[in-house]
Image (cartoon, grey):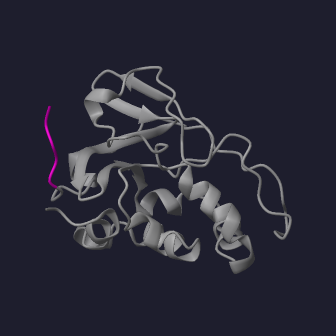
C-alpha cells in the first residue's frame, strides 16, 4: 500500500511541499490528513506559497490565526466523498464542494486542467487515504479575509495572471505513482 497523504508529501523529491506541511502543522491538521479519508487534495508547491504576499503569509502563520489558516487549507480538499476523486471524474465547469464549505471551479483548457485559476500540474497521485493533485497556486477561498489581528486586515486580492502559465513537465515532481483509468 502507498503511504498516507502526509507521509507521501513528506517524502516528495526535493522537499517540494515543505510550505504546505508547515501550514498543515501550524493549523493542527496533520493528524487529520493521516486519517482514513478518503481525501482528494489539491496540493500547492513551495513555489505556489512563495507567490503569496509576504505579509499575508506572516499573518496566517501566527498561532492566533490558526483558524484562518485551517480555512485556507481546507479549501484545498474536496469535501468528503465516499471515494477519492480521480481526474476522469472531473469535468469542465464542475464546482466541487470543498472541505471549508466553499466551492471551487474546474476548468479544462486544451490538455490542461485548472481548479479556479490554479493549473493542475500532476494528477492522480495515490496515497493510502486518498489522491492528490499538484497545483501551481495556493487556492484562495472566495471572499477570504485576513484576520483582524493582521496589520492590514481585509480581503486578499489574488493577482490577475499576466501571462499564460509556463509550467512544463520538468517543473513538477515526477516520481509520484499515478493511476490511470
Q: Residue 36: x percent and y percent?
A: 35, 60
Task: Specify the principal SS of the magenta part.
Answer: loop
- Give the camera-side residue of 84 and 9: 84
Picture coordinates of residue 97, whole percent (x, y) = 53, 36
Instruction: Please determine whether, in this image, residue 148 is positioned above or below residue 63.
Output: above
Q: Is residue 75 above or below residue 97?
A: below
**Quarter occupied by residue 168:** top left
**Which image quarter holds the C terminus?**
top left
Counting from the top left corner in percent of width and height, residue 16 is at 33, 67
- From the viewer's perspective, is 11 left or right of 152? left
Query: Which quadrant of the structure image shows residue 67?
Result: bottom right
> Is residue 11 rendered to the left or right of residue 33?
left
- Residue 7 at x, y percent in the picture: 29, 71
Quarter in which the N terminus is drawn: bottom left
129 magenta-colored:
no
* Residue 168 is at least partly visible in this image: no
Residue located at (32% from left, 41% from top): 83
Q: Is residue 132 above or below residue 1?
A: above
- At x 68%, y 40%, the residue is 142
Of 72 and 158, the residue lying toward us:
72
Q: Which residues are magenta?
A: 177-181
Q: Quadrant of residue 121?
A: top left
- Report the side of 146 relative to 170 (left or right): right
Relative to residue 119, is residue 122 drawn left or right?
left
Seen at 52% across and 30% down, the residue is: 105
Amino acid at each position: 500500500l502507498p503511504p498516507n497523504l502526509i507521509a507521501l508529501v513528506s517524502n516528495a523529491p526535493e522537499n517540494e511541499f515543505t510550505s504546505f506541511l508547515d501550514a498543515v502543522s501550524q493549523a493542527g491538521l496533520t493528524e487529520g490528513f493521516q486519517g482514513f479519508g478518503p481525501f482528494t487534495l489539491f496540493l500547492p508547491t513551495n513555489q505556489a506559497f512563495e507567490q503569496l504576499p509576504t505579509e499575508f503569509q506572516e499573518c496566517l502563520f501566527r498561532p492566533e490565526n490558526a483558524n484562518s489558516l485551517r480555512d485556507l487549507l481546507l479549501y484545498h480538499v474536496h469535501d468528503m466523498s465516499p471515494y477519492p476523486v480521480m481526474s476522469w471524474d472531473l469535468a469542465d465547469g464542475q464546482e466541487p464542494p470543498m472541505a471549508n464549505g466553499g466551492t471551487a471551479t474546474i476548468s479544462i483548457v486544451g490538455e490542461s486542467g485548472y481548479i479556479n485559476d490554479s493549473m493542475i500540474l500532476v494528477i492522480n497521485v495515490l496515497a493510502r487515504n486518498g489522491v492528490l493533485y499538484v497545483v501551481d497556486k495556493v487556492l484562495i477561498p472566495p471572499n477570504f479575509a485576513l484576520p483582524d489581528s493582521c496589520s492590514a486586515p481585509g480581503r486578499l486580492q489574488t493577482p490577475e495572471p499576466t501571462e499564460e502559465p509556463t509550467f512544463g513537465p520538468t517543473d513538477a515532481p515526477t516520481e509520484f505513482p499515478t493511476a490511470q483509468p
